[in-house]
Amino acid sequence: MQIEMTIKGLMVDPVTSMPIVILRDKTGKNILPIWVGIFEANAIASQIENVETPRPMTHDLVKNLIDNFNGEVKKIVITDLEESTFYASIHININDKISTVDSRPSDAIAIALRAKAPIFAEQEIIEQAKNSDIKPPAGESDRLEQWLEDLDVDSLGKYKM
């Protein structure tokens, strides 16, 4: 089952200094932290803030290509979690046929924001993430784990970078 998520926050991990996208379901019961690269975080933040660039950035280009082929991004889905790495897919409708494209979650989120498409996560992935030892690519996992446990998602702002 897929659960619709929204971006609750975009912040910097205090331990590793890596950006984290915090996804939360509508009930507020489930959060999903996803570590992303700085360029992807900037692409997400620029769209949240409606910053226009003089030329299309990569995610804008992808969205423009989809539009030019009369496609529509229907949704993105966080589909899998393997060895602390999340996987996602972008679901695109072209001529009443849905195509699913493999993607990094950060790219899928950046494209979903531009397309105003919903973000989903598989319920089993949310549960797996809760019960797994997700670690960022580098850092002090014990301190970070404690920080995530103490995280009050309601106190998060729109984003903090």
Image (cartoon, rainbow, N blue to C red):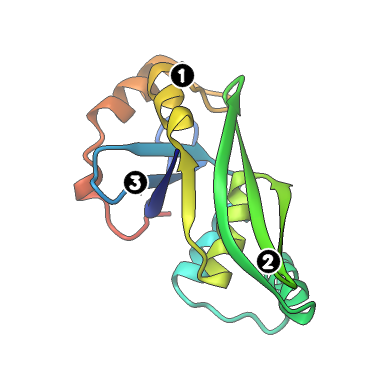
Measure how far apart labels 1 and 3 are at the Cα level.
24 Å
Marks 3 and 2: which is nearer the front? 2
- Crowding at label 3, few (<14), some or many (≥20) Cα neighbours within 10 Å? many
Residue type at mark 2: give it: Asn
- Crowding at label 2, few (<14), some or many (≥20) Cα neighbours within 10 Å? some
Residue type at mark 1: give it: Glu
Describe residue 155's horizontal placement relative to residue 70 as left or right: left
Q: Which residue is mark 1?
A: 140
Of the residues under marks 3 and 2, which one precedes in the sequence? 3
Marks 2 and 1: which is nearer the front? 2
Residue type at mark 3: give it: Arg
Circle 3 SS class: strand
In the image, residue 114 sits, relative to residue 76, either above or below, namely below
| Residue 57 spot, x, y in % from top left | 71, 70
In the image, residue 131 sits, relative to residue 151, either above or below, namely above
Q: Which residue is mark 3?
A: 24
Of the residues under marks 1 and 3, which one precedes in the sequence? 3
Measure how far apart labels 2 and 1 are at the Cα level.
42 Å
Q: Which residue is mark 2?
A: 93
